[in-house]
Image: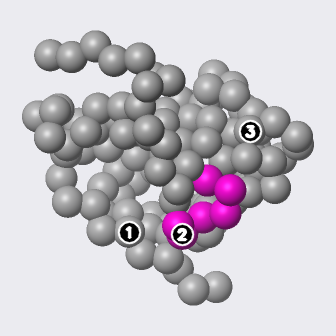
Amino acid sequence: MSVKKINKIPKEEVKAGSKTTKQVLIGFDEGPNFAMRKFTIQPGGEMPMHTNTVEHEQLILGGCAKVIIGDQSFEVKKNDVVFIPAKVPHCYKTIGDQPFEFLCVVPNKEDIIEVVKE
């Protein structure tokens, strides 16, 4: 059991993306079943097309982005909920002048990330 202040949790640069940071809110060492992360992609930033070996459940906290999941494209914003199945290629690109922020919950399993060459 734990309670934390989000502004006290360090932000890590996501090297695969541009202008992207991640905060691990509940880590694999804390949650027996799930981990929770907060991602922030600054205006003009993006995450390239990639796959993960685990599914993603996401809640958009703010900003707007184009999200491609498989062969479908979506424009998502605050209060949208996104599900990305395991092993399905996906990417994010910010839209507008606000940071795109979302919570991402994943199963507490090994997650191998692979950038998809376009």
Splitting the image into 4 quarters, where does residue 88 fall?
bottom left
Lower sequence index among marks 3 and 2: 2
Whether the residues at callouts 1 and 2 have beta carbons within 8 Å, the answer is: yes
Residue 4 horizontal/vertical position (percent): 34, 18
Which disc, if any, is residue 99? 3
Question: The N terminus is located in which quarter?
Answer: top left
Vertical relation: 9 (above or below) 40: above
According to the image, label 1 marks what residue? 113
- Identify the residue at horizontal 61%, vertical 42% (top origin): 40
Residue 99 seen in the figure: yes
Residue 74 seen in the figure: no
Disc 1 and disc 2: Cα gap in Å? Answer: 10 Å
Q: Is residue 20 left or right of residue 25?
A: right
Rate crowding at label 3 as few (under 14), some (14 to 19) or many (20 or more) other CA atoms within 10 Å. Answer: many
Vertical relation: 118 (above or below) 55: below
Residues shaded magenta: 15-20
- Identify the residue at horizontal 57%, vertical 86% (top origin): 117
Rate crowding at label 2 as few (under 14), some (14 to 19) or many (20 or more) other CA atoms within 10 Å. Answer: some
Whether the residues at callouts 3 and 2 have beta carbons within 8 Å, the answer is: no
Total number of numbered discs in the rendering: 3
Disc 1, SS = strand
Lower sequence index among marks 1 and 2: 2
Task: Please tell me whether mark 1 or mark 3 is closer to you in this view.
Answer: 3
Q: Is residue 98 left or right of residue 109?
A: right
According to the image, label 2 marks what residue? 16
Residue 10 horizontal/vertical position (percent): 44, 38
Lower sequence index among marks 1 and 3: 3
- Identify the residue at horizontal 66%, vertical 47% (top origin): 41
